[in-house]
Image: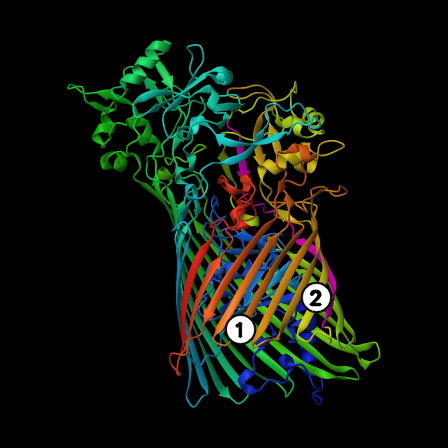
Amino acid sequence: MHLPSSRLASGIALAMLLMQAPAVIAQDAPESAEQPTPEATDLDALVVTGTRIARPELESVMPISVVDFDEVKETGRFTVYDALMLNPAIGPGLGEMNSMGQEYDKGVANIDLRSMGTNRSLVLVDGLRWVSGGARTAAVDLNTIPSSLIDRVETVTGGASAIYGADAVTGAVNIVMKKRMDGTSASVSTGLAEEGDARQTQASVATGFDFLDERAHLVVGANYVLTDEIPLLDRYTDRQVYQVNPENTGPNDGIPDNIIINFRQFYRSHYPTWCVFEGTAPCGTNAKDGDWYQLIDGQVTHIPRDSYRTISNNDTGTQDGGPDTAFGIYDYMLLRDKSEKSSAYGNLEFQLTPDVVWNTSLGYASSYVSGHAQWPGHRDDVRPINWWGINPETGTAHPGGIARLDDPFLPDSLREHMLAEGLTELPMNRHYSHLPMSREIHRRDAISFGTDLTGRLTDRIDWKGFLRWGTVEDDITTTNMVGRNEWLLARDVTVDATGNPICADADARAAGCVPTNLYSTEMPGQDWLDYVMPYERYESTKNSMLNVGLGMNGELFELPAGTVRFAAGAEWREEKLDTRDDPDTVKLHNIVWSPGNDHGLHPDMSASRRVSEVYGEVVVPVLSDLPGARRLDVEAAYRYSHYSDNPSTDTWKLGLIWSPFDTVSLRGVKGFSTRVPNFGELYSPISMVTLGHIGDPCQEGRILQDDDRPGNCAATVPGWTGPLPTPNQNAPRVFTGGNPDLEPETSDSFSYGVVWQPSFVPGLDLTADYWEIDIDNVITAIAYGTIMNNCVNASGGPDMGYCQFVHRHPTDGPGHLAGEVDYVQAQYANLAGRKARGIDFGLNYARGLGPGHYRLGFSATRNLERRIISQRGTAGTDNAGQFQYPDFKFTLLNKYDVGDFSFGVNTRYISKSLYAVNDQSLETREMPYVPEYWQHDVNITWHPDWDAATDYSISLGIKNATDSKVKHPVLRAYATSPHLTADRVNANNGAAYMDGVGRYFFLTFKADF
């Protein structure tokens, strides 16, 4: 280990002091803290109660929750991610309903404790770190954890860095694996949505047995989960979005600034589409008064003016309404990707001596995810600056598709139309949705190995030495990619001596060029596909981690109030990340994506880190069995971490729990956490994407949505003469990537609450805890739209904490106006701070009821504040009450066991919330509120007595039994946003927060023998 000598000496001294403490007679303790027998001599019982010292759940100073994984599967949730989504304190992070548009990590499953970022949520397995599963994040991909032998999932919500290290800023999730099992358990499940799709099938088997005279025990298990994709159009045929209201005159005129429209952009039609104004095409700024046409099945068709209204005035503008033929971008979109997940896991426990037990485990997990690429389609349009690049012969940009009178493919109807309009050339817009969908496919393989020795140092102190190694490899293939050069050559068409269409370039013909029919909606022949879109992109990511450590846990000595308990240890780990783009750079620069220029490049990255740590924790009983003080315990923890690539850090925790009498406990904890930037935040190479349109708050219409915008735009936009035109016709750029100058972020957190177990209601316990997390120097990458809006929405002048990242053209130039956005820096940066606070509520009740047994579990979160501060000394923006951070969420679980049957009813609730809490007023948006959401799941399990030697069960259930919908139209029909980082998911996808599948039926058969 590479610790500075003074800190190393302090850590060793702490460990030696605790090891040499006198061993005295044990005092009665709760069951989970009893003196372990040799068979149970392990520290796994100490996991995630906010401490490494074992204690009953309700005696923890920090709020915790425990989920039995087998019981969760009875509700039709077969993955850890789905199980954790029942906890109202956990946000969706990345999952199967919102990883579309990810730059690197499509298909992963990350959790987001307190909804403060996946990088601040630590995931452990059996109390130890697990290898990261992302290309640019330290977050664990839950899909890489073998699930066949998961026993339970424990969650502590609160700063836990002093106990478990960096990344536990908002808490930790510990997945506890089964170490012992007698017999075999097998199950198979399948389900189907009411619409007849969305099938999910699961199969698992696990077994365990003793051998070598019961000195050894082996458990092994395997599982498989298949999830079908859901095309977006199978659920939502219309795309409802907010757009600037062209009738708006100001923020306080009684007219909504933004209206919900049936979003159309005619230029993205899957048919050739164009605009003509007084014999001129394209229309430019006359599009509002021009006539729109489409070529459908070879016939020119006029789009009736009374079928739509113009929202933004340009050939690439936006329309409200119009025919379904006038918008094709949804043809490829998926609401949920297709995935296959399989895993196997085994653990061997061997008692070497009466006091020493050896455990070793080996796991493998594989996942396959296939969905649409960042933008799955191919298109071009009439803009003079296009993504086909510059023509080296003319020095000007290659235009989009143009209909010419000498084109041999030109349909007669279009020829007549052009002649009637006096046109020899007609620039066209087109989304080529008849071409094969571009898919992004991830094949991930995760291997984990762990071994540990646990034993007894004295009759009251246990020790544990461990080693854990893990690796996750992700092979990524993007299919059906268009070659820019081949596309341009194939659309340059002439005729041969017999009048047949051919590619005009002789060298291209020799290379197999097949001419393109720009007007057809039929799938091209295989020879055309082989020439124009033969490309696939191959990338890879590899994460690895080696973690070793030695820990001790036990009882130190007696005080009048009880036994002083402790945990201490030292750990060392090495983490590595390697990402590789396709090595064929010539191919990469020839691949087209849309919208933009070339497909975003992913420069190679290699990073490694070594961390050495020492930690200690102690629980001291101060008072016990006294009037007004049945129990008063104080606890403290400290961790020192030395990083090879970051400054060394200190974290600590102080806690107290006081029980004035048997039925009531008051608890509180204050902690200081430090999180160093991860590999992606530090070292991600800077990448640039070019956008077609950008939502500039200083544009016409948008500038009227906030009273502060006119003045702030005038102060920050060069050459300001008034609102900028919308939509922009230039090609603004957005830069994303890491920042090697990042500094660690620090966090002060505290919580205090009450636990009540009323004696007059046996089996009932209630908890309420206030919590607060205040992060300073917060590391974040904010979406470019948020940066631009926050720059000019501030009162008292522009917010330069955001404005510094927005760069505008100082003067007019080719393709742009003065003041239009040139580029936005959306890289990782240290902002001033981030603060969240709220209240958690819990209720558990269990007792006999009639002939059976009833259990109830209730958990809820009340959000009070969700503030982001860009500049010190400013108030920042508070997002509490926005739909991602609703005022109130709860989950209610009910189960009744009677005879051979079990009945379950589960309810999730999300309170009414604002779509955007920082809007100027409720006038800013039509339908500013997202309605409250209720979801009810029901299930019934039958345990037939078919065979005395085998315990069978058959479960039938309905998820979302009332078919509750995502009730806000903008959340219901989302658009994939490309080039998202781990911090910027498709947050506007309501299906990540509320069920988007609909009523879903499932059946499970299980046998234990």
The residue drawn where x is 45% and y is 26% is 322
Q: Quadrant of the N terminus?
A: bottom right
Q: Is residue 462 above or below residue 225?
A: below
Q: Residue 985 lies in magenta, yes or no?
A: no
Q: Is residue 787 visible?
A: yes
- Secondary structure of the residue carrying tag 1 is strand
Specify the quadrant of the image occupied by residue 599. top left
Q: Nearer the viewer, mark 1 or mark 2?
A: 1
Q: Is residue 282 left or right of residue 821?
A: left
**Dot 1 amino acid type:** Asp
The residue drawn where x is 71% and y is 55% is 838
Q: Nearer the viewer, residue 262 or 505?
A: 262
The residue drawn where x is 53% and y is 29% is 732
- Secondary structure of the residue carrying tag 2 is strand
Gap between marks 1 and 2 measured at Cα: 25 Å
Q: Which mark is residue 897?
A: 1
Q: Is residue 699 left or right of residue 353?
A: right
**Dot 2 amino acid type:** Thr
Magenta residue span = 731-757
Q: Is residue 225 visible?
A: no
Specify the quadrant of the image occupied by residue 945. bottom left
Q: Position of residue 430 (x, y in %)?
A: 38, 27
Question: Which residue is disc 2 drawn over?
Answer: 767
Q: Is residue 21 above or below residue 953?
A: below
Q: Is residue 574 above or below residue 406?
A: below
